[in-house]
Amino acid sequence: MISFLSAARHGVLLAALLTSPALLAQEEPVSLNLRWLPGKTYTQETTTETFTGLPSAKKADEVKMKVKQTTVIQVTGEPEGTKEARVTFEAMAGEVMLQGKKQAFDSTNLKDAHPMIQSSIGQSVGKSFILVYDGKDKFVEVKDTGAMSPTALGNPSLSGIAEAKEVAELYRRSLEMGLPHIQVKPGDRWTSQETIKFPSAGTVKVDLRVKFDAIVNYDTGPHAKISFEGDMTNDANAIEARPVSIGKGSKTYGQILFDIERGTVSFGAFRADITLDVQGQKVPVRQQVSTKLVKIE
């Protein structure tokens, strides 16, 4: 009798748990659209590790680079009106193998850095652009990219302006990678087709297969856990000159934790295994990227 009562009691508790509002809420569709909060400043930290194999195919010839970047996004505007998110690449630090030697760098002090590093970091750190969104948080345009453009005799070149816009658009697309435009619930799957223009590889098609794995508790509250995998290919219909092209078999995959209440990505981890075609030579590249939202204030 005691065991029967105990089993019955556990059955009641299990039924109560299964019908609790917290679990039932997980079955309701939720929006995973980015929602910028005017008056707030978002700080992200991104770590990127890139491994590039050289045509000699010797392990010792693999070029390695690790970069930690701090990005600050300041949002202005009205909650129900146009919003502007000013994105600033505030700091960079890391290390890279150049000419067989490990070169460390920090954007706060570049005087002893390799000239190639000084030039590259100098064109990025402290530079900014603006992402414009409408009252429904739909992306409108990129503007004010001129500060990111390399200059010739004090004036930005046309190619530099185009490249700066591509960098800004690439960053914007990375914020939304795999996110659906409709409400979804745990267990849902969808596909996402993106066309992204890279400064050197030209227009690239990214076909993603995405799944809403679950709602999990992370950091400040409930987050949507999203996983994806996909294929990368050059857009055969694009008419452009490409110094580098994406080879067959190039893939990407990763996970996202989306803050449902605050409408932003709190954490993302991505990996891309790419084969580049550089003047007829196949160059394997592996890149791992993790981005964490450090704070909103």
Image (cartoon, rainbow, N blue to C red):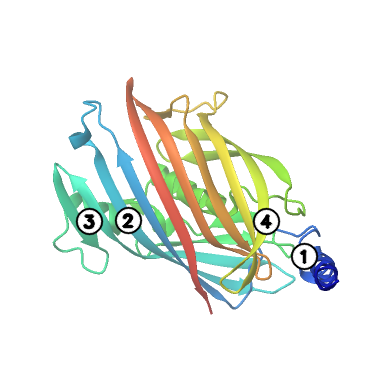
Marks 3 and 2, Cα distance to the nearest angstrom? 14 Å
Q: Which circle's residue, 3 or 4, is located before the other in the chain? A: 3
Q: Which circle's residue, 1 or 2, is located before the other in the chain? A: 1
Q: Amino acid at mark 3?
A: Gln
Number of numbered discs visible in the structure rendering: 4
Q: Quadrant of residue 243?
A: top left
Rendered location of residue 135, percent (x, y): 73, 65
Please, which residue is most extreme toward the top here? 280
Quadrant of the drawing holding the N terminus: bottom right
Q: Mark 4 Cα within 10 Å, few/some/many (few <14, many 20+)?
A: some
Q: Is residue 132 depicted above or below 211 in this figure?
A: below
Residue tagged by mark 3?
A: 118
Horizontal side, residue 89 vs residue 168: left or right = left
Horizontal side, residue 75 vs residue 27: left or right = left
| Residue at 49% from the left image edge and 34% from the top image edge | 251
For residue 214, the mark is 4
Q: Is residue 242 visible?
A: no
Marks 1 and 3, Cα distance to the nearest angstrom? 53 Å
Marks 1 and 4, Cα distance to the nearest angstrom? 11 Å
Marks 2 and 4, Cα distance to the nearest angstrom? 31 Å
In this rendered view, identify the residue nearer to me: 134 or 30: 30
Q: Mark 1 Cα within 10 Å, few/some/many (few <14, many 20+)?
A: few
Residue tagged by mark 1?
A: 23
Marks 1 and 2, Cα distance to the nearest angstrom? 40 Å
Q: Secondary structure at mark 3?
A: helix
Residue tagged by mark 2?
A: 67
Horizontal side, residue 32 vs residue 61: left or right = right
Q: Which circle's residue, 2 or 4, is located before the other in the chain? A: 2
